[in-house]
Image: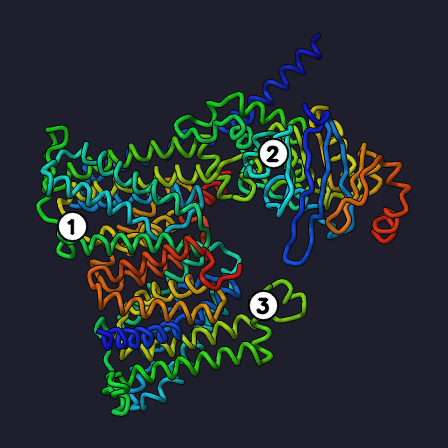
Amino acid sequence: MTTGDSVLRTEAVCKNFGSLQVARDVSISLPRGARHALIGPNGAGKTTLINLITGQTKPDSGRILLHDEDVTAVATAGRVRRGLTRTFQINTLFPALTPIEAVTLAVAERKQQAGQFWRSLTDHKETVEESFETLQQLGLGNVATSETRTLAYGQQRLLEIALALATKPKVLLLDEPAAGVPKDESAMLFEVVAALPDDISVLFIEHDMNIVFKFATRIIVLVSGGVLLEAEPEVVRSDPRVREVYLGNAHHG
Amino acid sequence: MSAEHTQIERRSTAVQQPLEWLKGQSRWSVFELLFWVAALIPFFFFPTYLTLFSQIAIAALFAISVDLILGYAGIVTLGHAMFFGLGAYVAGLLSAKLGWGEPITGLMISGAFAGLVGFLVSFLIVRVQHLALIMVTLGLGLLTYELANSMSWLTGGTDGLLGVKTWDILGYFRFDLWGYTAYGYSLAALLIGFLASRRIVNSSFGLALRGIRENTARMPVIGSEYRWHLQKIYTISAVIAGIAGAMLTQTTNFVTLEVLSFQRSADVVVMLILGGTGRLYGAILGALIFLLMRDQLAGINPQYWYFWIGLLLMVVVLFMPKGILGRLSDLVRRFGR
Amino acid sequence: MIGNIAIVLFDGFAFGMLLFVLSVGLSVTLGLMNFINLAHGAFGMIGGYVTVLAMRQFGVPFLLTLPAAFLIAALVSVFFERTLFRRLYRAGELNQVLFTIGLVFVATAVATYFFGTGQQPIVLPSWLRGSVEIAGLRLGVYRIFLIAIALVIVALVYFGLEQTRMGAQIRASVDNQRVAQGLGLDVERIFAVTFALGSGLAGLGGALAIEIVGLDPSFGFHFLVYVLIVVAVGGLGSVAGSFVGAALLGIGDVAGKYFVPEIGSFLIYLLLVGILLVRPLGLFGKR
């Protein structure tokens, strides 16, 4: 612990797509147990930043540190194994698998059991049980054995989170977890997020300002690939620049 | 106290339920047992067709090997005859050039060799997707064919490899003219290969393969080094394909370049599609339908056999995307309730 | 020796141009709809048989059969496209591959039924036969004719894609189908037209190929491998890629068979695998 209690840190991360700058010297830091929101107008580079942190996109320059370890050169799977994972804005699930299968797969990967082709899946009893507990925790217990494609949309959003939780993350990046979910249900989804154990640091992207102000302890404002401001919700709420670039012309003013 | 008790109880049955459900997914059904019993019928009722049924069992084993990578892991291949042919030639060369005709060690050596090549090739396979993947598998298959063709001093080239002699199995069962031993031998190998594959697809590894097929992009995000999974199953598949090829050599005492041909690579995929991918019995049923049809139709007019298979293929792709077996099981499910 | 190399280069280039005519249509349709049409070679075969029939049964001169080969292959293909192929645009690549292989099987059997398994030779007009001597090299007249036709087609395809309204629409659809659709382009119609034109070119290629490689019912399968190599190596949707890929393959094939007949084909496939491993999207592929 050389730099306080930060679990995840980015240092001057830059990324260009052609002539378009999608990340400009982004340096952010997530402390242990954080509930940070990442906001910004469309095209600000929020999802790209998550892709950069998880390694699905390679930065042009800058570093990404997880528990003070430089993981910039580590592939996505390796970062997940070190405790950094994410969910997707658009459902990225396994349509023909049932939730219990999908989550069991994620748990088995974490426990290094997924390569064992000589043992029956059901011999890994604890793995299956742990998966079912995760599903129950998210209220998916009763659909655990239905094919994912038959699940209601809101349930699929929850399964996104369940898959991420199955990797036992220390850092969880949620890319619009409630995207496409009706307003009343999205509050419920965030109750789930708020109820996550304290040792998980969460960074979430969300457009609904009511939800952001309700659940975030700190807000990072991203504009044109650069951090405009990082502060407590009250500060962000009253910052004139934020009002101008974001709240002023966005949908939820 | 009692409320707490029932709560614990409810929880434990609930935990039990998905585990039971998963077990049910891999449990042996009556149909399966019936199928394997039925596989013995040719011994008693169709003794004149034993050679054909031996070919079917070998083709079914080959189709299972392709199903593991294509049906379960989603790797499309048009060049898997490469491993079938390698196994066939290794078994043939062992006997013809080295004088070693013991069948069971022959199978093992052939499978191991095909597996070794499969492992090396797997490094290339995981680098490409889509059309490039199809073309690379096709290219590797054609390349192996041409290699065997140009090494005619070793392989016998287009004339075929002569002088293969397979010893009695376990020093006791002699390969007879009728094919009793050949079919028994092929059937036993098919059963063992099937049991091994069944265990693989019902393991956590098999689940990982289905995950790759369903959504490759998600795999790294749940911490999976999925390329390694793909290389593993590709190697296993090559071993099984190699064993199937070696069986063909041992039951016919002859190897021709045809074992490496594109036609064989295409035929096996056709069998799989007919039967249904992603289900091991689909591979077996596909091989059965394909070879029985070929035997009957080619008997009437060999030139037009591909007309029917082509037509059947088009119909299956358009109207039975899960294959004939998938269609059957859907029907059974619908009328069974 | 230098003369040999020059002749091999020339023959190889001529063969490559034939491959270009056969495959450019598939490259464009693959880039447009991501539909893997393995029956492309079968449309080429149709063109070949149209020419054979027209010349033999109706005494039509060779040159006049070429437009007919183009038209009939185009018409047949658009019929299949509208009735069958379109159902598979959203299906996986495996289903597309198998369905079109099934079609090739059927086409092969039908051709066998009507024409038998034998080769179908044609008699070229006398002015296309023999060879001329240019700079001390004896060059086949038919091959010069082939190169000329291919270059005209390259020019037409380029002009068509770059200068016409339809061409602009096709390019827009290849670049980004959804955006094109959003702009109000009728992508389905564009694809049907492109498909017809591409298959027509295959038909023309089939007719032109008779003199070089012969024509029998296995044509659809035999040339499939060559056509796929051109498309995969050149890169989907790239006309320039198809041109370079076809020229390379043609020259490589002829040179390989001439200089190292033992391992000529082997080297071709090795090259194919090697190129795809380094550049999975082909030499000119963008996506």
Q: Is residue A145 left or right of residue B41?
A: right
In 3D space, how far apart are the residues under numbered discs 3 and 1 (Cα atoms)?
A: 50 Å
Tag of residue A222: none
Marks 3, 1 in one chain: no
Q: Is residue B85 left or right of residue B333?
A: left
B35 is higher (above) or lower (below) than B137: above
- Report the quarter where the N terminus of chain A lies: top right
Q: Position of residue A207 (x, y in %)?
A: 78, 45
Q: Residue at the spot x=58%, y=65% of the render?
A: C175
| Residue linked to disc 3 | C173
Q: Amino acid at mark 1?
A: Thr
Q: Quadrant of residue B164?
A: top left
- Secondary structure under tag 1 reads helix
Label 2 marks a residue whose chain is: A
Q: Residues within 10 Å of mark 1 (few under 14, many from 20)?
A: many
Q: Position of residue C159 (x, y in %)?
A: 52, 81
Tag of residue B155: 1
- Depth-wise, is mark 3 or mark 1 nearer the camera? 1
Asked whether the beta carbons under mark 3 and mark 2 sit within 8 Å of each other, the answer is no
Which residue extends farthest top? B1
A241 is higher (above) or lower (below) than A164: below
Q: Amino acid at mark 3?
A: Ser
**Relative to the observer, which residue lies in front, C18 or A182?**
C18
| Residue linked to disc 2 | A70
- Secondary structure under tag 2 reads strand
In 3D space, how far apart are the residues under numbered discs 3 and 2 (Cα atoms)?
A: 43 Å
Q: Residues within 10 Å of mark 3 (few under 14, many from 20)?
A: many
Label 1 marks a residue whose chain is: B
Q: Residue at the spot x=71%, y=7% of the render?
A: B1
Q: Position of residue C180 (x, y in %)?
A: 63, 67
Q: Residues within 10 Å of mark 2 (few under 14, many from 20)?
A: few
